[in-house]
Amino acid sequence: MRRWNGWGDDTVLYPLVPAAESFLVERIGAGTPVRGAGLREVVAGIPDSRLPENSMFTTDPEQRLRHARGQSLPDWIALRTGSINNFPDGVAFPENDSDVADLIQYANHKGTRLIPFGGGTSVVGHINPAAGDQPVLTVNMRRLNRPRGFNEEDKLATFGAGISGPELEAQLRARGCTLGHYPQSFEYSTLGGWIATRSSGQQALLYGRIEDLFAGGTLLTPAGELILPPHPASAAGPDLRHLVLGSEGRIGIITEAAVKVSGLPEVEEFHGLFFPDFSSGQTTVREMVQSKLPLSMLRLSTPMETETTLVMAGHEHAIGLLGRYLNLRGISQERSLLLVGLSGNGRIVSAARKEAIAIAKQNGGILVGNQFGDQWRKSRFRSPYLRNTLWEKGYAVDTLETAVTWHRIDETLEAIENAIRDAIVPAGERVHVFSHLSHLYSSGASVYVTYIFRLADNAEETLARWYTMKTAASNVIVSGGGTISHQHGVGLDHKPYLAAEKGKLGTNLISDAFRRADPGGIMNPGKLIDAG
């Protein structure tokens, strides 16, 4: 069964090897486990629903709890400690578009707020009910998960928006195709959620981000139905798909989506390379991307993330041998790990691999084979489970990301890491921070930062530590000209910084669009931007 207060299936464990625990103790101190609130205890404290009984939804307390929060660190703190302030008053499980339309009509008539819910994997507060006098109805879309059309010639596939990543790929693979969209939340997140938050998959370098894959679909709004035909291209004014992409449920509910699919790759492989420092690795990946090599993924870790990755992996003997080998090749303390993914036709992959390795060697890179790549591929959807293990040992983990142009990467990365470290000093604590570049583009890259710190002995202090570090990092991102969100959306956590990126006119234009589709303001209010 899925965990109600953590990540994933409760039968899946991700153990922390002793060397990794010792590493964390050395870096930030020993963690102290915090007593958690039990499921029955939390359910017993849920207030009565403000919605009347209705066959369209349930007011069951446990269902309301399971739909009250997502997967952000503030969500975890609230769930783990039972300090949840707001719950949906009901949860609906529509089975078709007509059910969704009925729910919107009901909510519009009754003045009930609606929150679309896909896989519940949001890390920035997209699905959290806000305080207020109006009742809240969460709409779980997971039963709208059936295939609705497939055209082999056009390479277009249409699905109900509630289909999860594994379900979608299973349907496509049976037809010899793939979407190729693999966010880390792939195990649970949904097609509609990807579109509504503008997500990016781990192999977007080849397959594209979700805005590249989303061809069209259907959006149901309080003002009516918006049909987006899957034209291959159009010059007929602004592209209305971009009103839906990243709309976070504020404009309506996506019920159906057509996506551009690809044939299954003949070959797929991932290789590891080490560089003497982060700078030489960065030069390499920039040259690879700007050369337009047909690669599916590039992920370059800083020396600190490289060290952390090797420690967390265990296999101390093998890692020790690797270290000695790299030392002999002149790659020692500041080593930086690069993962290179290739997918597609065998001849193309072979040529791309040869050229990629040549570029890497010109910059001092050493190929160490596919062991690291294979291990990454095996664990890429399992690594979020480490959050559960670390929490049980008294540690909190969070991530944040931005995207900047190449000439700003070094200063941005350093500024973010320093801001996080400095922010926790007044609390008398330390934080372990490490980063990587992923989702590379010809003009720049995503900077993805992970930070681990110790839990306090109470929820308020743990939340305060997180807020201080998150705020410091966000301010640095905005002041440095980076986007406040490269792939996680805006929700609640990034909302204070959106105006700095969009400007006053931009935010007003977005608000105007929301009001046109949702005159009563019932659709997921308070997220992304205030409609004014």
Image (tube, rainbow, N blue to C red):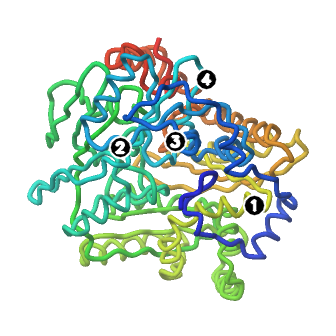
Query: In this view of the protein, can residue 361 be seen by the observer?
Result: no
- Residue flagged by tag 1: what amino acid is it? Glu
Kindly identify the residue that appears in the image at 32 percent across and 70 percent down.
343
Question: In the figure, residue 481 lies in which quadrant?
Answer: top right
| Residue 264 as seen in the image, left or right of residue 322 | left
Question: In the figure, residue 387 lies in which quadrant?
Answer: bottom right
Q: Which residue was labeled with disc 2?
A: 192
Residues at circles 4 and 1 in contact by the CB criterion of under 8 Å: no
Q: Which residue was labeled with disc 1?
A: 392
Q: Earlier in the sequence, mark 4 or mark 1?
A: 4
Q: Position of residue 400 (x, y in %)?
A: 60, 45
- The residue mark sitting in front, 4 or 3, is 4
Judged from the image, the secondary structure of the residue bearing numbered disc 2 is helix
Question: In the figure, residue 506 lies in which quadrant?
Answer: top left
Q: Earlier in the sequence, mark 1 or mark 3?
A: 1
Q: Position of residue 274 (x, y in %)?
A: 57, 73
Q: Position of residue 182 (x, y in %)?
A: 41, 58
Judged from the image, the secondary structure of the residue bearing numbered disc 3 is strand
Q: CA distance from mark 2 to mark 3?
A: 27 Å
Query: In this view of the protein, can residue 417 be seen by the observer?
Result: yes
Q: Which residue was labeled with disc 4?
A: 131
Q: Earlier in the sequence, mark 2 or mark 3?
A: 2
Q: CA distance from mark 4 to mark 2?
A: 25 Å
Q: Residues within 10 Å of mark 2 (few under 14, many from 20)?
A: many
Judged from the image, the secondary structure of the residue bearing numbered disc 1 is helix
- Residue flagged by tag 4: what amino acid is it? Ala
Q: Which residue was labeled with disc 3?
A: 404
Q: Earlier in the sequence, mark 4 or mark 3?
A: 4
Kindly identify the residue that appears in the image at 50 percent across and 18 percent down.
530
